[in-house]
Amino acid sequence: VNAAHAVLGASSAQRWLNCPPSAQLTADLPDTAGQAAAEGTLAHAISELKLRKALGLISPQAFGKAAKKLRADPLYAAEMEHATDGYVDLVNEIALGLPTAPYIALEQRVEFSRWVPEGFGTADCIIIGDGVLHVIDFKYGKGVPVPAEGNPQIMLYALGAYLRYQFIYDIQRVRMTIFQPRNGGRSDAEDRPIADLLEWAEGYVAPRAALAAEGKGDFAVGAWCRFCKVRSTCQARSDYNLELEGFQKALPPLITDDKVGEILRRALDLKSWVSDLEEYALSALLAGKKIAGWKAVEGRAVRAWTDQEKAFAAAKDAGIDEAILYKRVPVTLAALEKDIGKKAFAPLAPYVTVPPGKPALAQESDRRPAIANRPTAQEDFGDAPING
Ligand code: SF4
């Protein structure tokens, strides 16, 4: 039963809720979270420290000492300051927006085992005030933007927090916010009564968690597969993607526009599945295993200076102009704003324009409105007449 501890965690809830048997299937596999996860942990530690200081929970001296240690970490990057400052601002904004001083908990372990066998997680920030439970999740990663609406991870944190504090504080409603400084910023879920969340936990989470704990239920392929430890070798995912071959049997010589839509939809997972397979095959081959028909080779290597300073000095001695050795390149608009901050950037605003974005393909569910009757790139260059 102990294995269930790591098995049904909040951070993997989207996966095991959608694909319950994935929980036990991956339970004993080693964690493959790499550098990105370690960077996230460091950014979290910095944000927590900054919040403790902002809330007066530690002295400036203690802060200075602890911050120095974190900033000496080899994974530390200046970008983390901006990101964690943004998170502290957001927490402050929420806390100060309440009529009376709220209760605030940082990095709080919350349990939701009433619905999920041995389910627990760590909520980054919980704020309770004015009958509202605020749950804030800080995500440092920049892979995929995660919307707060309908996000099972933060909903489980909210449920755990509710269980923990319901007898001490009056909690009527829940507000969930995800902050992703490197991925679009703040995302707020719609404010909802706690009863809604409890209904979701009883009706949806509990039965699925029970299946997951027993290793039962149906496999289901979807966006969550990319975080699954068996994403490369999962039979269900392979079947799902290979089913596409069935489309070859389409009879007429040309496929219809309806078919194009259907194939694109079905192929959504295909690209990432193929790169997962490539990654898997390469590491298997490097580990000495056999993958029929494939081998590992040395990729193309790029030349590099052993000592750039000495090489450039030698180039200068040989009469090569400094202007050839170094280029003066303007920084991009986004980089400048990030470096100097929004305030200092404000006077430059009159020189900023936002041209319409290049037409892109998106699914019907995408929030952006549909565009049509725009010249395609080809027509823009006059290769074809525009129908009008
Ligand atoms: S790869 Fe996808 S379908 Fe397969 S077990 Fe993992 S989550 Fe389920």
Image (tube, rainbow, N blue to C red):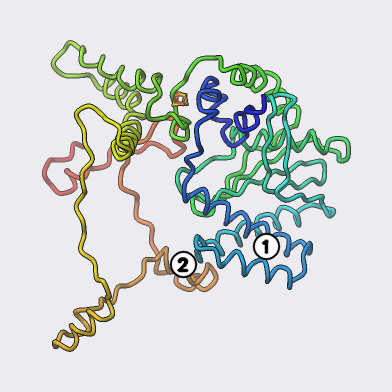
Q: Is residue 151 left or right of residue 112?
A: left
Q: CA distance from mark 1 to mark 2?
A: 23 Å
* Foreground disc of the pair 1, 2: 1
Question: How many numbered markers are drawn?
Answer: 2
Residue at image location 44% in from the left, 29% down from the top: 230
Quarter of the image with the C terminus is: top left
* Up-down relation of residue 363 to residue 325 (above or below): above
Which disc is residue 337 wearing? Answer: 2
Q: Earlier in the sequence, mark 1 or mark 2?
A: 1
Q: CB atoms at circles 1 and 2 under 8 Å apart? A: no
Please say if 308 is above or below 153: below
**Where is 232 relative to 59, above or below?**
above
Q: Residue at x 66, y 34 (%)?
A: 155
The residue type indicated by label 2 comes to: Glu
Q: Is residue 351 above or below residue 98?
A: below
Tag on residue 50? 1
185 or 225, nearer to the observer: 225
Callout 2: few (<14), some (14-19), or many (20+) C-alpha neighbours within 10 Å? some
Residue depicted at x 41% and y 30%: 231
Q: Quadrant of residue 269?
A: top left
Nearest the camera: 19 or 354?
A: 19
Left or right: 202, with 215 as reference point: right
Counting from the top left corner in percent of width and height, residue 150 is at 59, 32
Residue 313 picture quarter: bottom left
